[in-house]
Image (spheres, helix red, strand yellow):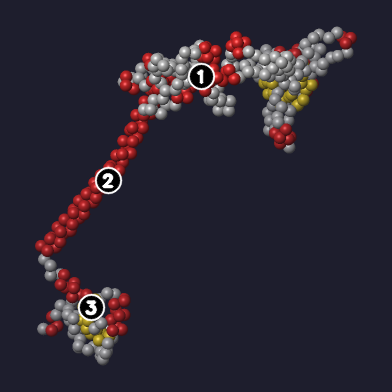
Amino acid sequence: MGEDASPDAPDIVTEKQCKKCNQTVISALVKCVTCSVCYHKSCAKILNERKKIFNILSENEMECVHHNNASSSHFTSDNKSHQNSSYEDTESLLDLKNIKVEDAVRNIVAEALAPLLQEIKYLREEVRNLKVSNVDLVRMLKNAPNNGNSKTSTWNKNNFLDVPTNKNSVPDRGFSNQLREPSISNYFHSNASEKIIPISSQYNEQEVGNKTSEKFTPIHDSSTSFPTSFSLVLNKEKQTSRREEHIPKPTKKDDPGKTYSLSSLNEKPQEDFQTVISKKNKRKFIRGKAVASPNSGLRAVQRKAYVYVGNLMLDTEEKDLTNFLKSKFPNREFLIEALSKRDNAKSISFKVTLDQEIFNECLKEDLWPSGIIVKKFYFLKKETATAHQT
């Protein structure tokens, strides 16, 4: 009867007997609210630290864990399937929420990038328009003197380049007429009282100064950022006043009281450039070419040349090479010097000192036996030669 109880049922203990130490609980009582099992407070603390066998509700109350397990075992299979379905619904809701969050973030990023993309598109259009409109200028800049040399090229507005005034000079590259029309000449407007004079070889300073009836003023197109300094804009009044005031002073060779009149100045040709003839370099030398008589007593040292002769047999000696060269060039002196070689070298090489007059003849391939290497001898630098000798 009492022995047929289920194994999960708690042991039958008196109300005031500790289930852990089987001692009577006098004070510090902790009792389960469901099965009335009692523990000392110290015993309950030790058990709860080792393994969670009960949940402490208050200072004197607790609840065994197996009661919660027993109550959870009363759920039916329908309840379990309901829990599974609710779990799946929750998971699908979370996925849907994540998708909504991603869409929201994507929309925010797209709205933030829209102005930047529009600005990039606008800048690309501007760059393309500038390239098309300044084709002539780019071509002339490439063909300008001292192009690419930043050290020697200097900017001079008085001798820049020719600025064409023909709109049709821009080649058709597949763009619309709207893109081809803004050429360099469109940045400057002219009317009856104002005129633009581009810098060209056909205009010189004197011709520009003789145009007394024209007034030249700069015209700048406010719709573009093209600088007006790319065209020579002259003011006749400034040019004439500057020329009248400039009277050169007499030099030392001239009469001290001599002066120049304006009429004589106008008669002289006005040149844009003056060729400066530099002095000869003091260190530059000359080499005599005259044929001196034998009795003059002046003779120059015979110029020497150096030839490398290599790929010779190891048993080749200096006298063998000297005899060969003297047989080819009689009445000539040769200085033969054997070059250093490696320990495992299979050939030997020589340095030949000979006259400069027979240097080219000595380098002909028909002169030497087959397989011998002959070339001009190059001396090593001091550091390399020292390392090579050591």
Label 3: few (<14), some or many (≥20) within 10 Å?
A: few
Query: Disc 1 designates what residue?
Result: 237
Task: Look at label 2 and name its amino acid.
Answer: Ile
Q: Residue at x 77, y 25 (%)?
A: 337
Depth check, mark 1 against mark 3: the one in front is 1
Judge left or right: residue 264 versus residue 340: left
Q: Label 2: state its secondary structure.
A: helix
Closer to the chain start, of discs 2 and 3, is: 3
Query: Disc 2 designates what residue?
Result: 108
Judge left or right: residue 179 versus residue 389: left
Q: Residue at x 35, y 19 (%)?
A: 181
Depth check, mark 2 against mark 3: the one in front is 2
Foreground of the two, 361 or 122: 122
Residue 287 place in picture, x, y as percent: 77, 15
Residue 131 makes an appearance in the image = no
Contact? badges 2 and 1 (CB < 8 Å): no
Q: Label 1: state its secondary structure.
A: helix
Residue 20 place in picture, x, y as percent: 27, 83
Q: Label 3: state its secondary structure.
A: loop
